[in-house]
Amino acid sequence: MKLNNNILFSGILSFGLITILLTLFNIQLFYLRTVFSFVFLTTIPGFLIMLILNIKKKGFWEYLIITIGLSVAFLMFAGLAVNWVLPWLHITDRPLSFIPLFVSFFIILSIFGFIAYRRNKKFYLKITLPKYNLLNITLFFVPIIFPILSILGVTTLNNGGTNYLTMSMLGGIAIYTFIIVIFRKKVHENIFPFAIYCIASSLLFSFSLRSTHIIGYDIHEEFRLFELTKKHAYWSMLFSPNNQYNACLSITILPTIIAIFTNIKDEYVFKLLNQTIFAFTPVMLYLISKNRNIIAIKSYLISFFFLSQVWFMLQMPELNRQEYAIFFFSLLIYILFNKVFRHKQNTILFIIFSLALIVAHYSTSYIYFAILVIYYIMHLIIKHSYIKHKPIINIYMLLFVMISIYVWNFQLTQTGGTLLTVANNTWKNMALAFNFDMVQSGTNNLLFNNSNINSQSNLDKVYSLKSIEYSQLQKADRLYNISKYKNFSPILTESKIILPQIPNIISNFVNTILRINKILLVDLLIFIGLLYFFINREIINKLELNYLTLSVSTLPIIFAIIFIPILKIDYGIDRVYLQTLILTSSLTITGAFYLFSKIKASYLIICIVLIIYFLQSSGFFTQYFGGVPYLNLNNYGDGYDKYYTFDSEIYAAKWLSENSDNSAIYADELTSLKLRAYANLINVRYDIFPSTITKESYVYLNAENINEKILYIKYYTGVITYQTPLRFLSNNKNLVYNDGKAEIYK
């Protein structure tokens, strides 16, 4: 198929006109408006920018993902410009409503289209579809089943069914990966990125689509700020001053634009559409590896290791702002190692994606800048080494990123004070940097996801401190007399587990093997990979030296998070680890191949090790060998109790918002998230103890608080669970709302 200038732009124009008609007439038959609008918004702006920059000589997947990255950046920056300019010109005080956005984007994209057309008059592209044999046709179509199984499995679980479909999906991914390694020499190169995308999206959907409402922790505050922006059709830091979340355009302006044009239910912008974009991140990791001349099957295994992380599957869908930031981070790493684009093109893309990362998420941008600084310092140290070293980062790039972070976080949004507070607290607490308990806690979090926080001693400590705090802050007549609860003491509730389906001695042995396998992959292989490059220094070229230096630059950050307590509390090691895996996953797989290099079946052994890790991280093995129930597989367990949201809880939250007076509102740490997201009730007290509850206050209880008699309160980096004081509430307060799932006392 031959594609020239006229055919190309006629196609873009036709696509645009169809999208406009579907949007203006709100034609949602088979979700046509949603699909066409979302595809248009996430491809056409970036595609026009690519044409303006004359970027053509790239493979399909590289071109597609960079196009999507540019489109998302365009939506944030064009949306921000519309948000500021239209009110300044006194055109409208609701710039992020449909008509102002539609007209503004139509004008901007028309200008982009005109420039792109003029710059590509001699455009010519010959499209040839790859010819697949039966094996490759099969390997192409099989991954399509995984997202379908994921969505059907989630739907079944949400309706009280079993996890058979989701388990089949996870088992199918493992079998597919094993087969693709066996036939690695016969697999067409284009199969790998497509398979990675299908696997990644299916894993993300298996968590994000649980419940018909948003699910997770941070996502509730993200959703609240999105709803505020959409409600006012305007973004302003005044809606939530000094709130770092509010400074993230990825969860304010961006979802507002997507929701308005697609007309999809608000929750599903976060639950579905955002996940379809983040699923390209492992694909970009594959392309980064290929760009470094790593063979296709090894690049696939590098990406498979990344998406096998529990933090990718079960945490990132609740951190939408960081999903976009890590997506841009992966694009930046690709650009830094790109050998095809001209220098000017690389520079422009570096500027765009750096700015997009900065406005997408504050912490990820700080980590990004720290990695660049450490890399540059290491470059200065090794620039006189045995290899003539041309750095991929220069002082001007560092200054640009630093100034951009300063302008956005410290001047425009004025949220940078939190960073200074963390830095100050870190300095003050340096004496605790190598405290054994904190180091052990951080290491366990990285290796085993264990925590000893939920203990009776910690609960007693919290109860005592909170009782003293409230007695000092509240007037005596506002608190209940001690005679009302003189025999009360908080009772810890134990975490729920799945019992093993096999004898304990066998399950204990298997779980030990799984821990050893995890230590090998997470902790040891990265250093074995570094050892391989140290021993084989003669194979290190300029490109690999830059990669190694940038990868090693992430290690001081990981160690800092583990050893410095305040950093571990303010920004978990899991988030940093996942970001740095964009660089270090390759070292891990290199270490694996070096470790098993003397074995003929090294590919199969490494594949099996990775599959075991994948099935462990996804919760598959837990269903048989026992352990903590995973939310993506169970309607049971702490994750389900903490985060699953029912319609009745939202109705109760909205009733409380509409009918409450100015009295204080109490809800546990996790239930309060739903009050914030769906009722904009932000001044909620978490301490539901008889000694801390005021007489005139409201107490909101959800289904788990009532039926399971479980309350949650945050303690350092985890939560403590304790019994709900139902007898005290029923004896001393009136039940003013009860819908069978949620109760409100006054």
Image: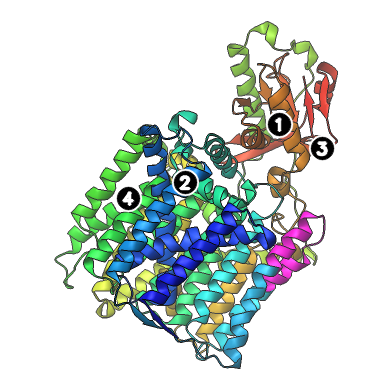
Nearest to N terminus: mark 2 or mark 3: 2
Nearest to N terminus: mark 4 or mark 3: 4
Helix, strand or loop at disc 2?
Answer: helix
Q: Is residue 491 visible?
A: no
Picture coordinates of residue 276, whole percent (x, y): 56, 61
Nearest to N terminus: mark 3 or mark 1: 1
Picture coordinates of residue 383, whole percent (x, y): 16, 64
Helix, strand or loop at disc 3?
Answer: loop
Name the residue at 83% across, 23% down: 735
Q: Is residue 488 visible?
A: yes
The span shown in magenta is 149-171
Find disc 2 in the rendering and name its residue: 101
Mark nearest the camera among 2 and 1 is 2
Name the residue at 42% across, 79% down: 594
Look at label 3 and name its amino acid. Answer: Lys
Task: Using the numbered discs, state the Cα–Cα distance from disc 2 to disc 3 in whole angstroms.
Answer: 40 Å
| Snapshot quadrant of residue 157 | bottom right
Find disc 4 in the rendering and name its residue: 370
| Snapshot quadrant of residue 488 | top right
Secondary structure, magenta segment, majority class? helix
Find disc 3 in the rendering and name its residue: 741
Q: Label 1: few (<14), some or many (≥20) within 10 Å?
A: some
Q: Is residue 189 above or below residue 224?
A: below
Given residues 459 and 315, the one toward you in this image is 315
Nearest to N terminus: mark 2 or mark 1: 2
Q: State yes or no: discs 4 and 3 in contact (Cβ < 8 Å).
A: no
* Direction from residue 92 to residue 473 in the image, left or right: right
